[in-house]
Image (cartoon, rainbow, N blue to C red):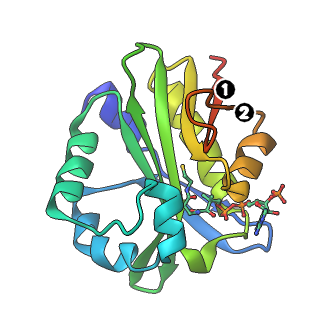
Amino acid sequence: MNLFQRIRDHARSARLPDGTRVFLRPLRAADLKHAQEYFSGFSEESKYLRFMTPTPTLTPETLKLVVEVLQEARAGISVAIVDHGQDEVMIGGARIVPTDRRVCCEFALSIVDEWQGRGLGTILMREAVRLARALGYHRIEGSVLSVNTKMLRVAQRLKFHLHVDPQDPSVTIVSRTILP
Ligand SMILES: CC(C)(COP(=O)(O)OP(=O)(O)OC[C@H]1O[C@@H](n2cnc3c(N)ncnc32)[C@H](O)[C@@H]1OP(=O)(O)O)[C@@H](O)C(=O)NCCC(=O)NCCS
């Protein structure tokens, strides 16, 4: 196992503010067989806020991109899981990918509708920063629709800097320096 795999294989448990226990671990290729079920947990609004297109669907191309992210050394996906006895259910995910600037990565975050507003987005966003730091990035950023108050609240709470994209005011760029 190489260094990047070791970093990504690190799993932990966390508690939501209401005491519910969730597990945070890297996405595994085997999880993709549940992708359709996971994707169906998002309302049209949530999919629009995440993908910035009207009605995204889960296509083979999307899954291929996910697999490519898993294979890229400087990328990673952390997922949040709840354990229902023998079943693990995926309830959220945070993804880190490199940008064309060497020390800067881009994040994306999504929590299934049923679990939104319970503090999980904040926990997974912290996890994204931790993953980015472990992968050697000095800066993390993301493009968020300016109407996405929930995501902007999460970013603000974690001390991200917010600035409206001067080219497109419907988008807010959120970014943060990552200290070693
Ligand atoms: C954005 C998202 C990741 C946030 O995750 P979450 O688990 O809902 O977030 P949290 O519960 O940790 O925090 C939500 C914050 O929004 C606030 N909030 C909740 N509902 C809100 C609403 N309708 N309007 C404004 N703020 C709201 C909460 O009070 C909380 O802020 P606080 O911590 O300052 O009190 C999640 O809602 C989501 O997946 N949305 C759809 C996809 C998306 O938008 N992804 C982001 C694009 S990168």
x 40%, y 47%: residue: 77
Residue 24 in view of the camera: no
Residue 180, compared with residue 74, is above or below; it is above
Q: Amino acid at mark 1?
A: Arg
Residue 29 in view of the camera: yes
Outermost residue toward the bottom in this view: 85
Disc 1 on helix, strand or loop? strand
In the depicted view, which residue is nearer to us: 102 or 3? Answer: 102
Q: Quadrant of the N terminus?
A: top left
Mark 1 to mark 2 CA distance (whole Å): 5 Å
- The quadrant in which residue 4 appears is top left
x 39%, y 24%: residue: 99
Disc 2 on helix, strand or loop? loop
Q: Quadrant of the C terminus?
A: top right
- The quadrant in which residue 73 appears is top left
x 61%, y 31%: residue: 165
Q: Amino acid at mark 2?
A: Phe
Q: Is residue 8 left or right of residue 141?
A: left
Residue 56, compared with residue 11, is above or below; it is below
- The quadrant in which residue 70 appears is top left
User: Number of labelled discs?
Assistant: 2
Q: Earlier in the sequence, mark 1 or mark 2?
A: 2
Mark 1 lies on residue: 176
Mark 2 lies on residue: 160
Q: Are marks 1 and 2 in contact (CB under 8 Å)?
A: yes
- State ligand 1's quadrant: bottom right
Residue 133 horizontal/vertical position (percent):
54, 26
